[in-house]
Structures are given as structure tokens and as C-alpha cells.
Amino acid sequence: MERKKIQYAGEQTKAIHAGEFPDPATKASAPNIVMSTTFVVDADTGFSVEEMDEDSTWVYTRWGNPTVRQLEEKLAAIEEAESAIAFASGMGAVTALLFHLLKAGDHAVISDVAYAALSEITNELIPALGIEITKVNTSDTGAVSAAIRSNTKLIYVETPCNPILRITDIAAVAAIARKAGAKLAVDSTFATPIATKPLQLGADFVIHSLTKYLCGHGDALGGVLLGGKNDLALLRRKTSIRLGGTISPFNAWLIIRGLATLPLRMRVHQENAMQIASYLEQHHEIKRVIYPGLPSHPQYELIKRQMKNFSGIVTFQVKDKRNIKKIAEKLQIIHYAVSLGHHRSLIFYLDSGDLLQTSFKFDDPEQYDSWNDFAGEGIFRLSAGLENAEDLIADLEQALD
Ligand SMILES: *Cc1c(COP(=O)(O)O)cnc(C)c1O
């Protein structure tokens, strides 16, 4: 399967062409989907993944698949990573990484506010395996340094973090990780590679939920882990293939199609989010708006250094909590639904009391102060879609009325 790798300079060109090639048999210009789970092989083909390498022929789709490989190559090109492994979901990518890096007796430092499922497995399931976890506010680099132990193997950050849009200085935490001999993993789902490239800032691994902006259309779950070639080759053999969180080739094909327009979409997500955030900020019913593109974001200086695009998520607090249900029910264009990063605008209310009970565990009063600073009693998390901004603002206007 020899084919030459072309280097594309521009982000839009990469998003469209990287990883793809006309089908050798039919000359089809658009990628084919290969749904086959098994492949006809030579009689001397081995039955162990230990013998597998990058150039091996296709054997079984859990080990590797031509459509999934096209997705992985496109993602690696866009993120400027040596290598990528796609998974069935963002959480599939996260768990494969945790099982790869951590064993009983090891310690990991994890963002105290991060995607709820990651927070929840690191509260219970992972510690039950004999792995020590410390939750810190990773936007406070002093707190990260103070949490390091001799057995710290991993620092895990999410920036901007879900759901409160707090930012972590990736280069600063990468320096702490390097000194400690620990790996740094960054969940960059909210930023996307259009805004931030954590590997260039010193991270060892990047995670995206492909379900969000990278697919962009709300119709396929997926995840990806990106990093160095040797690390990921080992991870693919030891963890990903065996744990089995393999993405369906059909989902890979949908996400390849979504990725082609990622650079274009992120521009409009940012434009719409900026207009909505500015509108909400001056609305008399709104207490607080957080958006990385607003100078009122508490970390605006860091954001300007670290993010080339402010992405499309806005959070806001309402003055009167009794209006929450009414606002959710009155919206007509914006769907009241979880998830984010789709072409359709989505909104969901996240109550602080509920989240601090189920998902986020803070030991230090400073952690509560920081949460309150960003989220107060609770936030609407709005994912600005690709509709016309004036329609979205009109929808919010009638719902807030
Ligand atoms: C959605 C999300 C995940 C999990 O992704 P799934 O594809 O739903 O498994 C992880 N991290 C962040 C920041 C997310 O928003």
C-alpha cells in the first residue's frame, strides 16, 4: 500500500486533502467506506498484534481499517502530530490513555473541573485500581507544582474546561510535567486544533471528542488521541486494540466529511459566539457572561497568547434562577440539549449544586472560590451553531423576555 505523503501548507487544504487519496481500484475522488471487519490475508499471516506494524496489511477492523486510517492521518495532519489513534468516543480515547500510562502505585494530577465522565471515573473507578489521583485547579500553576509527587506519571488538563471555560496555561504546565518526569495530556475538545496546538506547547498527548466540533454535525460519536509515533504505536498494540473502543468505519467516514469544513466552520462559530456573548453581556436579565473572546474573561491575556480562535461556547448566569425553566422551554431555534460543537446551536443548564455533588470533588476552599467565580449557582452553556447570528439573538431575546 505504498503511497507518497504530500505536505500541505494551509489549514483548509489539509482539512480537505490530508489522509485522503483517490481509490486505486475505482479512481473514486471521494473516500470509499470500507465496512469489512475482516480482510483476506496470506497463509503465513500471524495472529498476534505484537507482530503488527505501520505497514502491515489489513487483518481485522479492531486492529486497523483503511477508512479509519484515513481519518487518523487527516487528524494527525491538522493537529501537526506524528500520529493519531481514533476511538469510538472521546471517553474511549481517555480510558485507553489512562490504562496505557497508569498502573497501581502511580499518581496522577487531574483538572478538578473537566468533562464529567472523566471526573467521575477518576473519583472512583481509577482510584479503586490502586492509582492515586489528586484533583487541582490546573489554571493555578502553583497548585499543579504543589501536587507533584515522586510517583506522578500524568498531568491531565482540559482547556478551555467543560463547562466553565476556565483556561490552563499549557506551556507552563508542560514545564512542570517535564521537570517531574510525568506526561502531560491535554483535552483540547473545546479549543479544536484551529485555536490551539497543545503538542507544540509541550504536551505529550492531545485528546479530542470527535463528537463535537471535529465532526461538527451531531451525527457521529468518535474520539482521538494524538501524540508521538513511538508512544502511540505502543499504545495501539497494548491498549487500544485490546480494550476494543474501536470507531465504526461509517462514523470515521462521516467525521472525515465533517473535518473538511472545520477551518471554515470555526470562523463562523467564533463570529456567532462573539455576537451572542456581546448581546448577553448587556442584557438586564443576565448576571454574568463568560466567553474566551470577551475582554471581560478573567484570563483574557492568556487566551490571546494561547488561542488563535475563541471557539463557539458561551456560558451565562441569569439574575433570577426562577426563570431557568421558562427560558429553556421558550427557545425555538436553539435546541435544549447536551453536547456542543454542532452546526445546530445547543444550550443546556448546569446547576452548580448538582455538579458539585455528582462530578466535581474539591478539597481546597480555593477550588470552590474559583468555581464560584466562573459558574456561580449555575450556568447556561450555549454552543453557538452556524445559523445566522441575528436569528439566534432573536431567539434568545424572546426567551429572556
Ligand atoms: C464530550 C466531551 C468528552 C467526551 O467525549 P464523548 O465523545 O462524548 O465520549 C471529553 N471531553 C470533553 C471536553 C467533551 O466535551
Image (tube, rainbow, N blue to C red):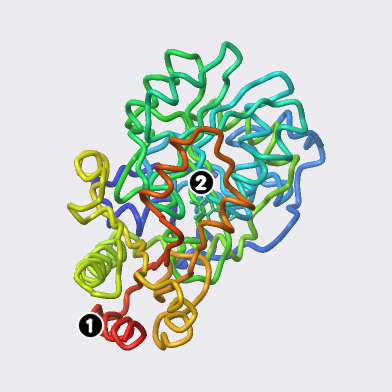
Residue 2 in the image, given as x and y percentages of width and height:
50, 42
Identified by mark 1, the residue type is: Glu
Q: Distance between the residues labelled 2 and 1?
A: 31 Å
Q: Nearer the viewer, residue 305 or 231?
A: 305
Q: Is residue 81 left or right of residue 243?
A: left
Q: Residue 114 carries which label?
A: 2
Q: Do tag 2 and tag 1 residues touch (Cβ < 8 Å)?
A: no
Of residue 213 and residue 151, the one placed in the foreground of this image is 151
Q: Which residue is drawn at 39% across and 85% down?
A: 333
* Amino acid type, label 2: Ala
382 relative to 139, above or below: below
Kind of element beneath mark 2: loop
Quarter of image, ligand 1: bottom right
* Picture quadrant where residue 303 is located: top left
What secondary structure is marked by label 1?
Answer: helix
Q: Kindly identify which residue carries mark 1.
A: 390
Q: Is mark 1 within 8 Å of ligand 1?
A: no
Identify the image quadrant of residue 7: top left
Q: In this view of the protein, can residue 29 be seen by the observer?
A: no
Circle 2 crowding by C-alpha within 10 Å: few under 14, some 14–19, many from 20: many
- Residue drawn at x 53%, y 47% is 224
Q: Is mark 2 within 8 Å of ligand 1?
A: yes
* Left or right of residue 358: residue 367: left
Pick the residue in front: 339 or 66.
339
N-terminal-most mark, 2 or 1: 2
- In the displayed structure, 224 sits above or below 354; it is above
Quarter residue 361 falls in: top right
Residue density around tag 1, few if under 14, some if 14–19, many if 20 or more, within 10 Å? few
